[in-house]
Image (cartoon, rainbow, N blue to C red):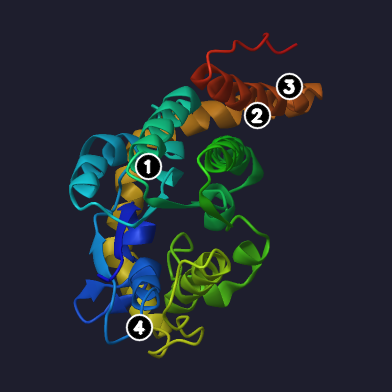
Amino acid sequence: MRPPRFVALGDSLTEGVGDPVGDTWRGWAALLAAGLAPADAPAEFTNLAVSGAQTRDVLERQTPAGLTLRPDIVSVVIGVNDTLRCTFDIHAVAARLDQVYAAFRARDAVLVTACLPDPGAMFGLPGALARPLARRQRAVNTVVHALSERYGAVHLHAAEEEWLTDRALWSADRLHPGERGHRQLAVRFHALLAQEGLVTGTAPAAEPEFPAPTRSASLWWLATAGTGWVARRCTDLLPQLLTLAASEVRHRARGTSARLDLSASHAAASALAALSGTEQPDAA
């Protein structure tokens, strides 16, 4: 019997940013791969995730490449970068994820998914800036939850409060996990797969293998690569985010903030309904 094939799709989180090993990133997917099968017959692992990827990239680039590898297990963890773009459209996100999930399930691959905390909270943005991003991420998570259930995915609820409060899990940029955080993801995914009888290897260790980066090393990373990462996204998102923040302030002043929440919830429901051809009534 051949070892299992595991293919990982996604963005910088799955690429492993925040968990450096030598001159490259490792990350939760690589840690999980090492625990899928016994050490003497390890899983075949391919990481197709790319920093900055959006759902469009996963659908148009990573999925065709992943399908050619005929994986037994495929992880699709994506969506945060969509929320950071002025082109964000929950209908498009839902349609793309539906196509990706369907393509791999049609090949009988085990689908692994996760919902994630919103980037505004992780960045520590002021409320008027953070709330619009939170709504977007909730919409993405709603879609991921629903489609994961529809396609029978092994789904990890990673949008839990502890990810926002346990600073030890996160790297210097406050958006990507550090080694400890990546290991927590790997441990949790492994446990879920083990419950389904889909792993035969030993669970990844929860404790870090390497010492945490020093404060000076973290500051250096932020001043070089980290600053560039944020700047590239701010150029695209910031003008629209300021507009969204202004709308947030106006609605709070009028006491109508609930309308923004209702509109976002309706958009997610409408996006899911559109996939099944059922129209939703307009929100009040």
Instruction: Looking at the image, tell me whether mark 3 or mark 2 is earlier in sequence order.
Output: 2
Instruction: Looking at the image, tell me whether mark 1 or mark 4 is earlier in sequence order.
Output: 4
Front of the two marks 1 and 4? 4
Vertical comparison of 15 with 135: above or below? below
Q: Position of residue 122 (x, y in %)?
A: 55, 57
Q: Secondary structure at mark 2?
A: helix
Vertical comparison of 137 with 226: above or below? above
Q: Secondary structure at mark 3?
A: helix
Q: Disc 2 designates what residue?
A: 248
**Of the residues shown, which amino acid type is indicated by label 1?**
Cys
Q: Disc 1 designates what residue?
A: 234
Question: What's the mark number on residue 259?
Answer: 3
Real-space Cα separation, disc 3 to disc 2, in angstroms: 10 Å
Q: Secondary structure at mark 1?
A: helix
Q: Residue at x 31, y 74 (%)?
A: 220
Front of the two marks 3 and 2? 3
Real-space Cα separation, disc 1 to disc 4, in angstroms: 44 Å
**Quadrant of res 214:** bottom left
Question: What's the mark number on residue 196?
Answer: none
Q: Residue at x 26, y 65 (%)?
A: 224
Real-space Cα separation, disc 3 to disc 4, in angstroms: 52 Å
Q: Residue at x 75, y 29 (%)?
A: 252
**Of the residues shown, which amino acid type is indicated by label 2?**
Glu
**Contact, CB < 8 Å: mark 1 with mark 3?**
no
**Of the residues shown, which amino acid type is indicated by label 3?**
Arg
Front of the two marks 3 and 4? 4
Q: Disc 4 designates what residue?
A: 38
Instruction: Looking at the image, tell me whether mark 3 or mark 4 is earlier in sequence order.
Output: 4
Q: Position of residue 130 (x, y in %)?
A: 59, 43
Front of the two marks 1 and 3? 3
Residue occupying the far front of the picture: 1
